[in-house]
Image (tube, rainbow, N blue to C red):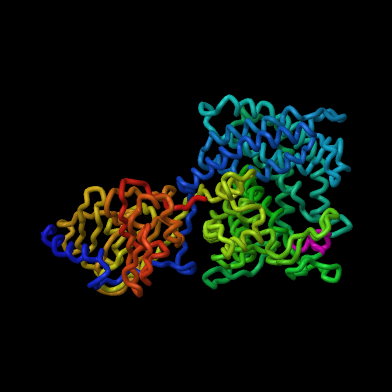
Amino acid sequence: MCDFIKHKLLILIVSFLFPHSLTVHYCNADLSVDEIKNIDTHISQNFKKLIDEAWKYNKPFFFDYLKTNLEKGNTYALYNMQIYTNNLVRYCSFVNDYEILNDLIEINLLSYKYLIFDRDGFRKWIYTFTDDPELVSLINKEIELSSIQYLYLISKIIHIIASIDQNKRTSIMSDFVDKFLPIIIKDHYLRWLPNYTTSLERKYLKLFPQKFQNAINDKELQLAGGIAEILSANSKDNNLIPLTTNQKESMISFINLANRLLRSRLSESELVDFNGEKVKGINFDLGMWDEYPDYSYSGYTGTSFPTLADKKSATNVGWDISHARRLVHVFDSLYEYRNLTNGDFPDESVMVGLTNQVVYGVFNKDFDKPLFTNYMDGTNGWYRVNYANRENFGYGPYALSNSIPTGGYGFWSRYNPDMNKILNSFWSMIKKGKTGKPDNEYLSVIGNYYSSGYFKIDQSPSNILMFLPSMVSFYDFEVDQQLNFYPGWNLFSINLIMNDNSIDYVLGSIKEDFLFLYTYDNKNKLWLCYFPEYPYFSDIFTIDFGKGYWIYMEKKKTLTIRGKLPKDKSVKLITGWNLVGYNSSEPETVQSALFSISSQCSYIWTYDTEKGWMVYIYNDKYTSEKKLEILTPGRGYWIFVKEDCIWDIDLFL
């Protein structure tokens, strides 16, 4: 019976490959930003390839950069190293990339030989560089800003090593811990604790004369974060990371003090999400920096460089989004390890609020050309005008936008998936600007507001190494995909991995509303069918990610699917015709989406309710109005390839 029905319906379905005499209705699954919440929270294999390639290119740069600068006595290079590699180090821990981690350990071991015993008997990195007039006052001194922030990075690496099974640790990992642990604890953290404890106590009571002197600075933040990492490392392996009772108590006491101060500096904001719903955001240290010179023009939002007449400071301004990248790593360190200090701060509501502030308060809500305000509260005035006596220097409105993709904010997608949606839109803009044509509107936005470069692999230091690592999902959360079916034939696919992908589970809510379900076995070139009334005659039992399906509906219905997005979105294609899904959560141009198979692909077809059949033909000047230009999630596609190949969904620069 199944073969008979297959034969009859196969005639109908095969005829769909020709754009005439069609009587089908497409499943309108072109999901808008407001309709879909499934965000690509995983790093695909192609993304990993990009990271690997970028690291291969940049690894020699980092070796040379750190060695050359420290030989000259420029210890400010330590500050830059943590900026460049913080996200990459975190990525290594989430995906267990011990190869890159070993490389990073080897590079950072270079800094050990440049430690100097100071007059007080502690080993420090002393600044002796004489070629930078802005830092001449720091010659022969320790730059605490650089050392504290660099040691946060080193502490994070040590925590990762402590988390690795002892049998899997490399010799260089053990050497790294042996060398740096006493440097971190005895020579730095315990030396700094008395002064920074006093400073935090005074700031908690706001005892300093000027308002900005009572603001929390990045040194205090990253000292607390680094200590949290060491405490966590000790909890993972107290033999590798031994702490005396007094050392541990001193560190926990400082974390508790820091948390009390941080909690006191949080303030809620009223925001509106992408669905028009009211949500809570959280600002940090709101207004504390208003009188600081860097904020003197925060009230001026003009596009021309400000004059003295334009000098005005906004009120209740948040942190600038460049410095606020410290909040990402430090608050995550404190959140993930809060149980070690017997505390409950920061809790999940704080992390969600901070994330909401960026997503709904800083983002310009333009998914085509995403930009970000200069300040966390949404203020978009100028920042650091004529900083350090540099004439005509300053950051105009949106000029700090590059801080969001490179600052690790993508890691906060775990608290709100809309963060990842924003960063996906940024990635899409970068790809659209790839053509290099002078009139490319996206190149203009990138050039004006993302001046650090075009996120190239062969750029040192590569922005890819600061951006892509933050896109990896280390917390799997379930999301929804909605498909709108119409009476008649609908061509659809799903792009989620479900715990139960049986037909009864996936299509259970519409089981009474469809007559037939078909898919195509691309390898064996056979049709497979499912009939709700005759399941025992069927040969489709599951609805699988990556496959395309034809479904015949008797009425209009909406199907909601819940699951997780895949880590690997690639699709295996067999010579000839393939019925497949588009395994992405974001629409993309045909040229970009099919970039990896552009030399193997001949045709790709789909169907649209209003436009009918649409096709993209490679190496053909197809000028019909029915040319396929955009691939969208939820649709099914017929792809013809000249040879077996792997379709990697993401586009690479």
Residue 548 point in image, percent of width and height = 31, 58
Q: Residue at x 17, y 64 (%)?
A: 11
Q: Is residue 297 visible?
A: yes
Question: Is 397 displayed left or right of 440 in the figure?
Answer: right
Residue in the foreground of this view, choosing between 341 and 463: 463
Q: Is residue 501 visible?
A: no
Residue 220 point in image, percent of width and height = 75, 47
Where 240 sits versus 366, above or below?
Answer: above
Where 89 sits versus 424, above or below?
Answer: above
Q: For residue 374, which quarter of the picture?
A: bottom right
Question: Is 61 displayed left or right of 652 in the figure?
Answer: right
Residue in the foreground of this view, choosing between 130 and 248: 130
Q: Residue at x 32, y 54 (%)?
A: 544
Residue 94 point in image, percent of width and height = 53, 42
Q: Residue at x 58, y 68 (%)?
A: 365
Residue 125 point in image, percent of width and height = 78, 34
Q: Residue at x 25, y 71 (%)?
A: 20
Where 575 sits versus 58, above or below?
Answer: below
Magenta stretch containing residue 196, yes or no? no
Residue in the foreground of this view, choosing between 71 and 405: 71
Query: In the image, which residues are magenta?
Result: 286-296
Quarter holding the N terminus is: bottom left
Q: Main secondary structure of the magenta part?
A: loop
Q: For residue 445, which quarter of the picture?
A: bottom right
The number of callouts visible is 0
